[in-house]
Structures are given as C-alpha cells and as structure tokens.
Amino acid sequence: MDKPHFQSLREELDFTTIQIADLLTREVTDAFTRSIEELRTSGQAKGLPIGSIAPDFTLNDHTGKTITLSEELGKGPVVLTFFRGSWCPYCNLELQAYQKQIDTITSLSVQLFAISPLSPAHSLTMQEKNGLSFPVLCDTNNQVAEKYKLRFRLPDYLHDTYRSLDIDLTRFNSEDSWTLPIPATYILDNQGVIRSAGLDSDYKKRMEPSTVLDILRTLT
C-alpha cells in the first residue's frame, strides 16, 4: 500500500497514530493515554510564556561543537524545537518536516536548533538517519529543558511499558533520571524574546512548520 500524500505535519502524525494503535496492545495505549492526562492536569511542564526572555544555554551538537544561544542570537532569530528522542516516531516526522523547510528558514537568516536528552552518539544517529542539516543539541539530564519549564519525570508504571517496546531511556540518554521534555517549539527574535511557542502535553501534537515560517516572516 502506497503511503498517502500529506498536506501537513498534523495529517502525517494522525496517520502514524492510527498505524501505531494497530501494533500496540490496549494495555500499552491505555498507559500512554493515562500518562498524557496525568501530565496535563499535574501543572508540570507548562513551558515559558510568550514575551519571556529565553534562558541562555551552552550545549554540544551531534558533532561535539559547542553552541551558545546568546552568541547565535547575535546572527538573527532562532527556532528551538525540543523533542523526546530518536525512538519517538512523532519526533522523527517533526524533524523531517523541518528539514524539508530548512532552506526557506535559513533564507530568512534564521537558525534552527533541535534539542533532546539523547546522548551524543544517539543524537548523531538521529541526525544521520533523518538527513538533518541543522544541529541536534545534546541536553544531558534535560537541564536546559528544565530552564524552559518543559522537563518532567515519567511515571514509574511507564518504565516497563517503554522497555517492553525496546525503549530504555537509560540507554538512549546515558543517564537514569527517566525524564523527558514535552515536545515544544519556541521562536525567538534576535533579542532572545519568545515571540511564539507551540507545546502540548500530548506528544502526538506538534507545531506546524508552515506556521513557524509564517511567524518568522513577520520577524524578518
């Protein structure tokens, strides 16, 4: 069966949700649904509001190069997209969608940085697998995600669920906190002010790259 032609990232994510549901047991999907609702109502990981000054940070990219946000803002606006990891199909689709738009993004004198708790080795694999030409930054233990109020700890009942799907965060992240960022995209002007933000407790929902481009055009 040929893959459908999608008009938006949302359509592709929704299609993937249907496909995944056919592969998982009801127990697993119920655990995921429960964890999303618990996170939504917990008050955790609500993110920084629009108008805030984006916290500065220094992280290494997938090649080991050091990236400091304040230095990059001196070159123009920046898009930060926080994702969960290479094991997440939704994250892969999102980053692939940004890669399709990367020439347009850079033509606006904007830089895009993807941030996750993946270890450098897994970040490099993620970058190579998806053919990404923008940096994938390694946020060990989600320290930067914490500054952006995105970090949360997975409930204990999900640990075995994840491991049953061959997703061991200790292996992927090279640390055992079992924390993740909620997926989020921040658009920063060249003063470091958050001009737009897209985030949701439901990891299946992501900001459309086309929306990001529309906002970037108003900044440049």
Image (cartoon, helix red, strand yellow):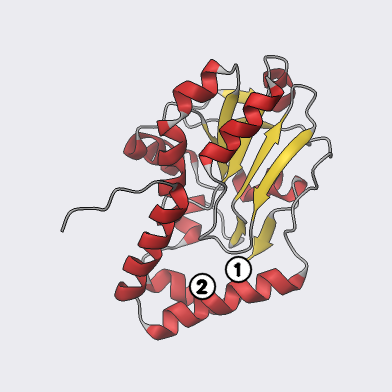
Horizontal and vertical percent for residue 192? 78, 28
How many angstroms separate mark 2 from mark 1 (CA)? 7 Å
Q: Left or right: where does residue 181 sit relative to residue 46?
A: left
**Vertical arrangement, residue 16 with respect to residue 131, above or below:** below
Q: Is residue 118 left or right of residue 76?
A: left
**Image quadrant assignment for residue 216:** top right
23 vs 129: above or below: below
127 left or right of 31 in image: left
Which residue appears farthest toward the right when viewing the image? 52
Query: Which is nearer the eye, 145 or 15?
Result: 15
Q: Which residue is drawn at the image coordinates 59% and 52% (left, top)?
A: 183
Does the image show residue 68? no
Instruction: Tell whether label 1 touches label 2 (CB within 8 Å).
Output: yes
The x and y percentages for residue 59 are: 63, 32
Q: Earlier in the sequence, mark 2 or mark 1?
A: 1
Q: Image quadrant for the N terminus?
A: bottom left
| Residue occupied by mark 1 | 154
Position of 167 with respect to 180 (left or right) is left
Instruction: Name the one closer to the observer, 94 or 152.
Output: 94
Q: How many marks?
A: 2
Residue sitting at x 46%, y 76%:
160
Would you name the residue on which mark 2 appears? 159
Which quadrant holds residue 197? top right
